[in-house]
Image (cartoon, rainbow, N blue to C red):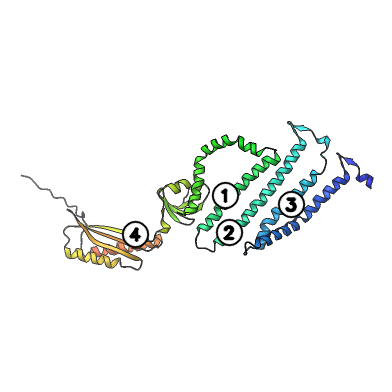
Amino acid sequence: MNEFLDQVWFDNTIRSYLIVAAVILFVIVIKRYLARYLAASIFFLLKKVWKNLDRKTFINLVAKPLGFFLAVFVAVITLHKLIFPSALDFDIYSVTLKKIFHSLGSLVIVFSFIRLLLRAIDFIALILHEKAELTADVTDNQLVVFFKDFFKVIVAIIGLLMVLKFAFGFNIGNLLTGLSIVGAAIALALRESLENLIASFIIFFDKPFATGDVVKVHAFTGTVEKIGLRSTRIRTDQKTFITVPNKQMVDSILDNLSLRTQRKGEMRLELGLNTSSDKLDQLVEGIRNIINRSEVENSTVLLNDITHNAFLITVDYFTGPITQDEFNKAKEEINFSVLRLIESLKIEIAGRSTDIHVTAMG
């Protein structure tokens, strides 16, 4: 039996192949349980920092990528203990097959490790999101989404550098130094993107608006649905979906309609000069009674001016921060009531008469 196990195939004994296969198979079998055990241990440590952690959610998010990483890591390390067969050590386009297998192994390890980090970021974001839901400030929620995407980009960049370092053998220090001039050129080319990224930080910390706010910018009015690293997505009143660069959201004059304390309604009445002062007084007093409604917080009604062709009455009133539909309904009711009052007082609107008088000159 020992003679059989000591036979050499491709520069390795059968015993070595069996040991490596047994180790890999053993890890594949127990990886699920081992990953859950490690995840539970990590959860126990995190529980001391965050008291309201959900054990099931954490294990479901972390255990699977952790098990995959452990299996890949052990498999690559175990296979590395075998001697690479000299019969297979040939070049492919000046690259040895051994180097190719080494790079593939490093690539799989880095991929599984980055995947594990991304799932960890998802879990931390989930915890912070649940805490943000407990506060009335919605900016906490959008900060969680923003930094979740931001750190995922950072981790992806780190993963790319690790691939270049461990899989392809690049000297990262020299590579970064060599790319400094190229990086400066890229920075100039991507200046607008960098400005939008900086503007996104300004939005989150200065908080001129938040997700869910109704804003008006560049003649567009709509609801902010998402604030990203580069742009802000707005659902307009026409139900279209527009994307506005964050730099424009910061540099432009932006009206946050959700933060207004009142809505303004106004009316300008030009009445004929044949209207008596008594009727004007009755009309002004009647309009004041009409706009004396529960939703109107303050108002002004006055005979504002007397011109060569009309009496000008101005009406300004302010409601509370009611919805647009409620405001439109109240405004329509006020307009109809004022119109009926004018008709009941038999007052003519200026410019209503269109009679043409022709005088014959003898």
Q: CA distance from mark 4 to mark 3?
A: 64 Å
Q: Is residue 164 left or right of residue 266?
A: right
Find disc 2 in the rendering and name its residue.
128
- The vertical placement of 12 against 136, above or below, is above
- Identify the mark nearer the N-term, 1 or 3: 3
Q: Earlier in the sequence, mark 4 or mark 3?
A: 3
Residue 150 location in percent, x, y?
57, 49
**Disc 4 target residue:** 264
> Relative to residue 194, is residue 26 drawn left or right?
right
Give the residue at x 23% y 64%.
284
Earlier sequence position, callout 3 versus callout 2: 3
**Residue at horizontal 68%, vertical 60%?**
45
Q: Which residue is mark 1?
A: 150
The residue carrying pointer 1 sits among few (fewer than 14), some (14 to 19) or many (20 or more) residues within 10 Å by Cα, namely few
Q: Real-space Cα distance between discs 4 and 2? A: 39 Å
For label 4, the SS is strand
